[in-house]
Amino acid sequence: MTDTILSAEPVLTGKPENRVWKKFRRHKSAMVGGVLVTFFLLIALAAPILPIPDPAATDWGAVRKAPSWAHWMGTDDIGRDVMSRMIWGAQASLLAGVVSVSIAVAIGVPLGVVAGFFGGWTDAAISRCTEALLAAPFLILAIALAAFLGPSLTNAMIAIGISATPIFIRLTRGQVISIKSEDYVDSARAIGLPTTRILSRYILPNVLPPILVQATLTIATAIIAEASLSFLGLGQQPPEPSWGSMLNTAKNFLNQAPWMAMWPGISIFLVVLGFNLLGDGLRDALDPREH
Amino acid sequence: MSESIQNTAQGQSQADTLLSLTDLVLRFRGQANDVLDGVDLTVKRGEVLCVVGESGCGKSVTAMALMGLLPSNSARVSSGILDVDGSRIDLSCNTLPAEMRGNHVAMIFQEPMTSLNPTFTIGSQIIEAVQRHSGGTKSQARDRALQMLQRVGIANPAQRLSEYPHQLSGGMRQRVMIAMALANDPQILIADEPTTALDVTIQAQILDLIRDLRDETGMGTIMITHDLGVVAEIADTVAVMYGGQVVEQGPVAEVFNNPQHPYTIGLMSAMPQLDDPGTRLVIVPGTVPTVANMPVGCRFRTRCAFATATCETRPPLRDIAQDHQTACHYAPLETNLSVSA
């Protein structure tokens, strides 16, 4: 008797991960974003094995040459191959994006979890510091920190990472506050699970989706920030290539060699677009309300 | 003679008492009045105690305070002794230790739809609960989980173990919650409106299940509900709460047939009678005062038809019959008031 009633109850199928992936695949712009990001990732990873000239090798016989069969994207003001520098520059940009966001997530998420879960003066202290950091505009803060730490790609990544941290603290804190009042957290406590276990198994997995989305979108912001810092000379140092520093040089030759500015500009645009589309798609796919 | 019988009965009942809560007083931060004002509850072996009352009377807060689930920064317990399984806990400075939660005292909640962690399978959640208290290997815990799912009447338990909460219906999730709560053989199960979110047929199945498990294990149950139908169906004893106080308690038949507190009388007459469908339901006039506006003395006096100046002092919960207590100065009403209908 009980069995017949139970087997008649509706049963949804599929793990949540599979449903998310299905929704994501149907999301056209997200797929475009995914393809763009994958393309740049592959290029950056393959840079050492691609048959391209040394990005630092100068050729005084080919200064500021327009795109040709010999140099597909042209050459720059001291005769370096722009395509080679673009590909190696992709490494710097993506690395800066991923590493700085990893720093921000690694610092921001634990602080946010602690602030949201424990509340009280811990929350007050963390939140006030967060607000103080948020009071300074993101890029200004990054520039100030990078200038303070000294110009190098590593320091630029640290500076961008720290500047992006408050966003993650705030987001995580808010999510944790809403998740910790869920019934399943009460029921975990009613089972007698210790706080650490509740945090790792009940709170963290349930606050991850929005953090994942925010991280993807922040990578785009971080890439622009890295390009801006490099443009200002605070990021990647010459002769190592970076899209931002390439733009910096290119601005002096906009009339004579527009390709020098075009390629890094287009690349920054595309990779940032890619991460934004990807982030939007992830957000929609992870949102349980949208179908 | 009758006194000696009563004494042995009391001695017997004390030995059988699984949980007793004495004089629980609790206040939320920023409020001028106590939300719970001297709540006493006792549960014996194999007994279902139903705590009834309307929304905001403190039933759920009592349960949460018992389990130590209230946030310590907003809820302050100023007195309260909890005796459970031989240990005495002073709730004003301690809460039920985590080692006892789920092991000695377990709890199930009102909303089965949201009471399971959506990111893990049913199996991993039950296994986690088992391993928390009973230890053992993962496969032992898995066997226990299977056994529990079978016991709460879930078909295909092996398959269900690897499913996620969203794949189960509300009734099945509540069964899983019960399986999880009882996996460590607790002596006390606290059920906070376990059937409110379920439809009536599933509700009856869940109540049957709780009753069967009670008969099998001899656990004591505290069932919190506002549904007098549920009380009539499952309760052995009932405690009626109003404004954070227990106003009447006793065996269910006694309280239903011979209610002595004016509030209980109001509750009973507000319940539709199948044998007398033509009559209008009597309602208790007014609404529950907010915590800040709780009257001094008897908290029901502002809505009570019999209230007098005497009611400005707090009536103690006193015996008016065997095991039947009422907190009203005038109980039993028949002898102390000349009620003209």
Image (cartoon, coloured by chain):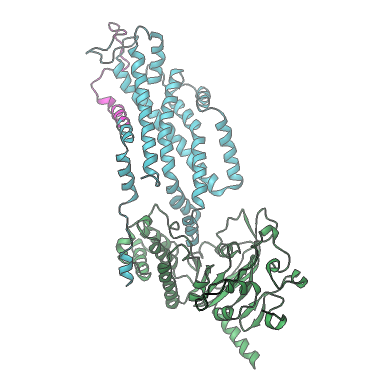
Q: Is residue B332 visible?
A: no
Q: Indicate the quadrant containing the C terminus of chain B: top left, top right, bottom left or bottom right.
A: bottom right
The magenta segment is A36-65
Residue A38 falls inside the magenta stretch:
yes
Residue A265 falls inside the magenta stretch:
no
Which residue: 44% across, 23% down? A152
Up-down: is B103 above or below A17? below
Up-down: is B79 above or below A34? below
Along the horizontal axis of the image, is A164 left or right of B14? left
**Farthest-out residue, front:** B278
- In which image quadrant can residue B332 be found? bottom right
Along the horizontal axis of the image, is A42 left or right of A158? left
Chain B rendering hue: green
Up-down: is A115 above or below A41? below
Q: Nearer the viewer, residue A275 or B332?
A: B332
- In which image quadrant can residue B33 be found? bottom right
Residue A154 is situated, as x and y percent measured from the top left of the image, at 43, 27
**Farthest-out residue, right:** B309
**Farthest-out residue, left:** A69
Q: Is residue B276 visible?
A: yes
- In which image quadrant can residue B79 be found? bottom right
Q: Nearer the viewer, residue A173 or A110?
A: A173
Which residue: 75% across, 72% down? B308
Q: Nearer the viewer, residue A224 or A129?
A: A224
Chain A rendering hue: cyan
Residue B291 is situated, as x and y percent measured from the top left of the image, at 66, 59
Residue A235 is situated, as x and y percent measured from the top left of the image, at 44, 22
Residue B16 is situated, as x and y percent measured from the top left of the image, at 54, 80
Q: Indicate the quadrant containing the N terminus of chain B: top left, top right, bottom left or bottom right.
A: bottom right
Along the horizontal axis of the image, is A129 left or right of B138? right
